[in-house]
């Protein structure tokens, strides 16, 4: 009888050990009066107190469902540095998640919404997209072709916009169609098109430096590196050759990030030789309206575009927003709306993007400006993440 009791005690103790083990939980809090769902929460090994992010899953404690996650290797050493997920949190509330161990097969599958790549078959574009928008910039081969008078070259450090109205990835599809039928992506067959002229303008958030009432800017990027692509984020690195503004030599490289559900790319520019920059929105035919709220830290340009309309915008910290200028000169592509931003410790961070009316998300200028204001408000009051 005593032996039976001892065995029962051991068994109950083992069950208690299994059931009473401490579980790591995450609480995500939303302090704003709006629901939130398109913002990446970034978890690191140090935050989670683990040696590896491999086989880490995030389970919603209310629904019991695993969240879609993305692992990011920031420095290319083969070791994952960040785990991303996008929680849904109602206004003025919190959502609880459990950190669980899962196999690769158990992780929920998702499309690669956020994608970018170097495109050697189209000279040397670097193109990026998510489920809302797409962009591209131009490389050294395109620059040399332009300087040598070879047809098809492009000399510009402006940011081009590809206007898509579908959520799935279109980069590879549009380039393949354009290879087969040159100019194909300039026609809308139901998915959108490339009809946003950039030229030497700043496009959608290209950088410039003003000196003696003239804006100066770099040439095309000279080197690139893809950091990550996946369901929740794409980011990449671009390097630019040193360039001159008066007697000052400017060095510049960027890390550009685009997250699922966002119309704006995050642009981190690392720069020396200046303490302020200007980031611009092309004015095209100057038939649109520039609006700026320096106190809130955003600038908008809403304009007609062929048979539709488009809003472009810049968002930055209001502490770094030094002013704005609508710059009009004789040469059309040099006409831009500029936001003047402060450089802090050789770095300036801002967000740039667009909303196309035919994508049916923003149909009026008021809706576009409300989005910029809401985007900035969420930057100022990020989701709060607590480990328990």
Image (cartoon, rainbow, N blue to C red):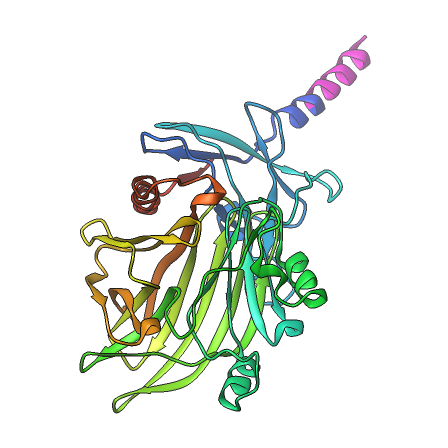
Percent x, y for residue 323?
18, 62
| Residue placed most toward the observer, 94 or 165 | 165
Percent x, y for residue 156?
44, 76
Range covered by the magenta-colored residues: 1-13
Say which residue appears at 49% left-offset and 72% top-offset.
238
Q: Quadrant of the N terminus?
A: top right
Number of callouts in the render?
0
Q: Is residue 384 magenta?
A: no
Say which residue appears at 54% left-offset and 80% top-offset.
153
Q: Quadrant of residue 105?
A: top right
| Residue placed most toward the observer, 343 or 357 | 357
Percent x, y for residue 357?
43, 44
Can I make out residue 379 in this image? yes
Q: Is residue 6 magenta?
A: yes
Considering the whole magenta stretch, tell me its main secondary structure.
helix
| Residue placed most toward the observer, 193 or 102 | 193
Percent x, y for residue 45?
54, 52
Q: Is residue 358 left or right of residue 278?
A: right
Say which residue appears at 18% left-offset and 82% top-offset.
212
């Amino acid at each position: 009888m005593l032996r039976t009791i001892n065995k029962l005690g051991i068994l109950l103790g083992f069950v208690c050990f299994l059931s009473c083990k401490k579980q790591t939980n995450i609480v995500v809090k939303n302090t704003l009066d709006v629901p939130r769902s398109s913002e990446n929460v970034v978890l690191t090994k140090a935050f989670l107190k683990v040696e590896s992010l491999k086989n880490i899953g995030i389970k919603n404690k209310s629904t019991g469902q695993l969240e879609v996650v993305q692992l990011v290797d920031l420095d290319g050493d083969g070791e994952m540095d960040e785990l991303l997920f996008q929680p849904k949190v109602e206004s003025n509330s919190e959502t609880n998640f459990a950190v669980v161990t899962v196999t690769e097969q158990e992780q929920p599958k998702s499309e690669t919404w956020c994608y970018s790549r170097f495109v050697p078959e189209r000279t040397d574009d670097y193109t990026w997209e998510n489920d809302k928008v797409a962009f591209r910039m131009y490389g050294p081969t395109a620059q040399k072709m332009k300087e040598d008078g070879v047809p098809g070259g492009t000399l510009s450090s402006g940011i081009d916009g590809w206007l898509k109205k579908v959520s799935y990835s279109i980069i590879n599809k549009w380039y393949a169609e354009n290879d087969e039928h040159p100019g194909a992506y300039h026609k809308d067959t139901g998915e959108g098109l490339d009809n946003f002229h950039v030229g030497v303008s700043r496009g959608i958030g290209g950088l410039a430096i003003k000196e003696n009432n003239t804006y100066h800017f770099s040439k095309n990027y000279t080197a690139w590196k893809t950091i990550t692509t996946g369901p929740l984020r794409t980011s990449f690195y671009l390097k630019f050759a040193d360039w001159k503004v008066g007697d000052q030599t400017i060095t510049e490289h960027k890390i550009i990030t685009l997250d699922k559900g966002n119309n704006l790319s995050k642009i981190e520019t690392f720069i020396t030789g200046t303490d302020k920059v200007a980031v611009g929105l092309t004015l095209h035919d100057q038939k649109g309206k520039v609006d700026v709220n320096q106190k809130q830290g955003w600038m908008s340009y809403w304009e007609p575009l062929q048979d539709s309309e488009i809003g472009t915008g810049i968002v930055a910290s209001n502490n770094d927003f030094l002013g704005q200028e609508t710059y009009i000169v004789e040469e059309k592509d040099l006409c831009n709306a500029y936001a003047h931003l402060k450089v802090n410790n050789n770095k300036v961070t801002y967000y740039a993007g667009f909303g196309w009316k035919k994508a049916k998300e923003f149909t009026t200028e008021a809706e576009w400006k409300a989005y910029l204001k809401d985007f900035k408000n969420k930057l100022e009051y990020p989701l709060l993440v607590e480990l328990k």
